[in-house]
Image (cartoon, grey):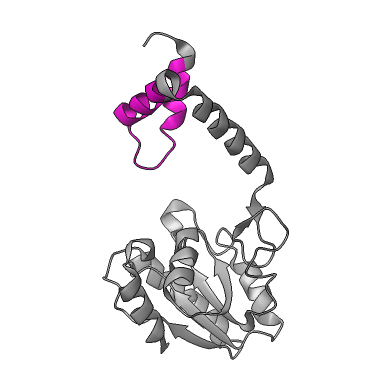
Amino acid sequence: MSGSLLDELVDALRVLPGVGPKSAQRIALHLMQRNRKGAARLGEVLTRAVEKIQHCEQCRIFTEHSLCEYCSDEARDQSQICVVENPADVLAIEKSTQFNGRFFLLLGHLSPLDGVGPKELGLDLLESRLNTGDISELTLAMNATVEGQATARYITKMANDRNVVVLQIARGIPLGSDLEFADSGTLSIAFEQRTPL
């Protein structure tokens, strides 16, 4: 592999999670050798997605519009918010539970050593939503990690200061694991058995 453009493609593919140098090389060679049409479509769709997908103005979920499908759905309970760390958590909750409120996406957890504070998680936006007085219940569906629980404590204090009921999903989710990897039965039970903090 001496072509600099091919080297650049291999290097670019390494941004994908779980894709190391060998996997990136295999993907690049496959696309160039067997699926150039697929590669062209992937490039086109990826370019459009980067240009058009943004964060919802209310909850930070990825969307092409100013409000995501959950925030714009009038049938959903506006007084309930479920706070999650990752976009995949929203999909897991939607698939496995009967939750019919709205969401708030943190896109991570508090991690001062990594420079992730309340502002980076959009907690100022969550605080603004809580200040409206329209929110009566906040469900914390945080990962069972030290950072996830520290984030949950921070949000709990913010909600308690505004007399908002805070629930945490039950701990059927194994300690140290991520919600997106939980099976739907475990997640459903954990969500049904959420408890006040």
Question: Against 9, is 146 above or below?
Answer: below
Looking at the rendered image, the quarter that the N terminus falls into is top left
Where is residue 127? Give x, y as percent: 63, 75
Q: Is residue 49 left or right of residue 8?
A: right
Is 59 in front, or is 126? 59
Q: In which quarter of the view is residue 34 placed?
A: top left
Measured from the top left, where is residue 18 in percent x and y? 34, 41
The one of 21 and 32 positioned closer to us in this rendering: 32
Instruction: Specify start and end residues of the magenta stretch as a single range.
Output: 6-30
| Residue at point 28%, 65% (across, down) | 176
Residue extending furthest top? Answer: 2
Position of the C terminus by quadrant: bottom left
Q: Is residue 127 left or right of residue 22?
A: right
Residue nearer the viewer, 32 or 6: 32
Write the residue at 39% across / 8% down: 2
Confirm whether the magenta stretch covers residue 121.
no
At x 30%, y 27%, the residue is: 22
Q: How many marks?
A: 0
- Majority secondary structure in the magenta region: helix
Whether 7 is among the magenta residues is yes
Picture layout, residue 163 above or below residue 18? below
Quadrant of residue 162 within the rendered picture:
bottom right
* Quadrant position of residue 175: bottom left
Residue drawn at x 59%, y 68% as measured from the top left: 123
Vertical arrangement, residue 175 with respect to residue 181, above or below: below
| Frontmost residue, 64 versus 155 | 64
Q: Position of residue 114 (x, y in %)?
A: 44, 52
Residue 41: x, y in percent? 56, 32
Residue 194 falls left or right of residue 76: left
